[in-house]
Amino acid sequence: MFDRIRILRAGALAGSCLVLAALAGCSDDGNDFDISSQIGADPVLPEPAPALVADMKLAEVVGWKDGQAPSVPEGLTVSVYAKDLANPRTVYTLPNGDVLVVQSRGPSGGPVSRPKDVIRGWIMSMAHGGGGEQKKSNLITLLRDTDRDGTVDERSDLLTDLASPFGVAWYDGTLYVAATDAILAWPYELGQTSIEGEPKVLTPLPGGPINHHWTKDLVLSPDGRYLYASVGSNSNIVENGIEAEKGRAAIWQVDRETGASRVFASGLRNPNGLSFDPQTGELWAVINERDELGPNLVPDYMTSVKDGAFYGWPWSYYGDHVDERVKPARPDMVEKAIKPDYALSSHVAPLGMTFTADSALPEAYRDGAFVGEHGSWNRSFFNGYKVVYIPFENGMPAGKAQDVVTGFIDGDQARGRPVGVGIDGTGALLIADDAGNTVWRVAAADGSVTDRPIGTDRAATLAAAPSDAAPDEAGGADSTEEPAAAATEQGAAAPAETPAAAPEETPAAPLPGAAPEGEAPAQE
């Protein structure tokens, strides 16, 4: 029966792609373009080549067979950390070394703004492994490695029946979860294996009914005062109207105690992978840029995120490159647009990022960041489907991205697709593979581990440390104190020139509830 379903899905996928190819007409497939020219601080940006329907090439998700695993370079080893999950998206390490795995599917039933989106949505759901019976998702699972040998010894579901969760953070006895429509807060002490009771709504976030980009990432500021939440756009290029974009395509700053919120930065079409550089205290993110300008536009990117900054969407990309499809034109906003720091090439769909200063990986991977590239769907050949490493120097990316974890795709079939990345309690890299329903662990081949667990959020590690512990004993977070103060001594008013209207102090959004199982794939 399963083979029959796979054959039907593969046939439907191939047939639909033929229909889309016919609709796309004679668009340039971009096969002769050097994608490496779009990696770095100054990417090559060809002329736009829009088509009626974007180029599409979709990999059928087949999963991992027993004994199969991604490939890593010499000096590293890869192993299964947890399997039989239900669309794992995010990995988060608590200060005691426990790992939280956020599993989720997007909310279903949203309105469709364009006829071609019906076809695209159906095909993408299959490309995300949506065929056949699926396990219940929208939950958070705790993984515990009691003896720090890289193998999970205990596993328990901490929270279930959530509304499409994605981001998570912990600080001083409280667990914060970014569901698709709100940041929720539960009392939680380190070591617990279950959470009871209803959460407090810290602040609503823009949700349905459209909710095009439903993933909401979360990170704690280095001083523990604020949470930063990513809110993706409600469209590709405002085809749902500018009012549908209120408070979206932005990163919010939320007071952890009061819930007061403001737009911290805007013009970021679909930001994810929020991370603070532990050496500089600067906020970084990876961004999925717009589609349907051709196979080689627009490069997705990683960038530092400045308070009050505007990064172009929807009116422009990479600074002053105007998107002529967006009407009315806004030359005033184009003039304000900031060029991002580092391009990753077009349509790789970066969804996760983590810095490596606290890891136990080989020296070659100790000063930079890993990025999980979920993989392309809207070009004629595959791009992404891997985890790359970007070396840093003096707080900025330096040199080309390096392929580190590959093998997620084989021909026209995807064994898995990387999403969130993080460092576990032993200093190894963890990768959430949402299509392979696995969390992978990549460690130093010589068995090196850190002296003690360091949480994903350094402020949380400091808060959990004994009161008489020196800063280096609690994770060495003293280097972030000064930059963090500079980042948080800002006023509470939203920037005056944010597009699509910044949220009010308490933005209007539906209160969260127990969400039904959704079927929507991650929007990129």
Image (cartoon, rainbow, N blue to C red):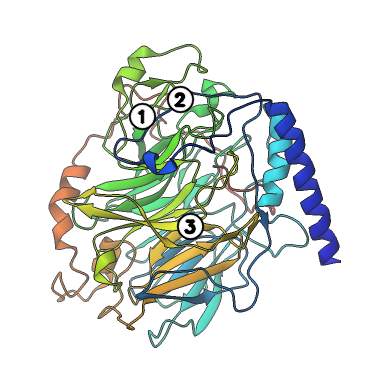
Is 58 left, or right, of 398 in this rendering?
right
Residue 443 has which mark?
Answer: none
Distance from label 1 to label 3 (Cα)? 24 Å
The residue drawn where x is 40% and y is 86% is 149
Observer able to see residue 30: yes
Q: Where is residue 165 drawn, in percent x and y?
A: 54, 54
Relative vertical location of residue 148 with respect to residue 353 in this rendering, above or below: below
What's under tag 1, amino acid-wise? Tyr
Q: Which residue is mark 3?
A: 386
Observer able to see residue 108: no
Q: Where is residue 20 drawn, in percent x and y?
A: 72, 33
What's under tag 2, amino acid-wise? Pro
Closer to the chain start, of discs 1 and 3, is: 1
What's under tag 3, amino acid-wise? Lys
- Mark 3 residue element: strand
Is 17 left, or right, of 64 in this rendering?
right
Q: Which residue is mark 1?
A: 318
